[in-house]
Image: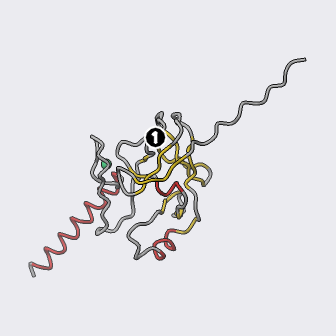
Amino acid sequence: MPSKRTAPRQRTAPRLLVRSSDIHATGVVTLDPVRRGQKIIEYNGPRLPKEVADERYADRIVTYLFGFGDRGEVIDGFAASMFVNHSCDPNCETDEINGRVFIRAIKDIAAGDELVYEYNLYDSELEDIADCYCGAPQCRGTMYSDDEIKRRNRATTRKAASAAKKSSR
Ligand SMILES: [Zn+2]
């Protein structure tokens, strides 16, 4: 009689550790090696319409909001996922699947390495600051997306132009 073999166990998610980070404040380190393409953790939390979140966190300097989908919703992050830092040399990316957001490895990651992905921030106010100190050789110096940088530059030019107009009166 052929021996019954148990089905290969589904690859379990790596164990993660939230701890102080060399990059910024608090970060998330994997305690297990991670394979390229592997889903690591869900960016989970309550879903809110963006306007509600903006109102709720208007006075908060730090927020853990993750914009997703095309209906202007955000995820108000909690648990380990909200502590994953930005880097301009990321080893992870975020992947949206059926309204859920997962952090997925884009390269093999060794145990003990910090998980990082590109925030590509958008929808900022001009006075907001999102400088990047990730230390990667290709660091862009900002956590904003390319489109957001262009938008901010246009807005700054407009503001300067209107200020110049006012002062020349
Ligand atoms: Zn950087």
Nearer-the-camera pick, 68 or 64: 64
Toward the top, the furthest residue is 1
The picture places residue 83, in percent across and down from the top left corner, at 46, 56
Mark 1 neighbour class, 10 Å CA radius: few under 14, some 14 to 19, many 20 or more = some
Q: Please state if 42 lies on the left or on the right of 156 as rendered.
A: right
The picture places residue 62, in percent across and down from the top left corner, at 40, 67
The part of the image, by quadrant, that contains residue 6 is top right
> What residue is drawn where x is 38% and y is 57%?
25
The picture places residue 16, in percent across and down from the top left corner, at 53, 47
Above or below, 25 against 160 in this view is: above
> What residue is drawn where x is 42% and y is 56%?
26
Q: Please state if 133 lies on the left or on the right of 79 as rendered.
A: left
Nearer-the-camera pick, 79 or 50: 79
Nearer-the-camera pick, 1 or 56: 1
Which residue in the structure is indicated by mark 1? 112
The C terminus, quarter of image? bottom left
Nearer-the-camera pick, 128 or 61: 61
The part of the image, by quadrant, that contains residue 161 is bottom left
**Type of amino acid at the residue the image marks with label 1:** Gly
The part of the image, by quadrant, that contains residue 130 is bottom left
Q: Please state if 62 lies on the left or on the right of 5 as rendered.
A: left
> What residue is drawn where x is 84% and y is 25%?
4
Label 1: element kind: loop
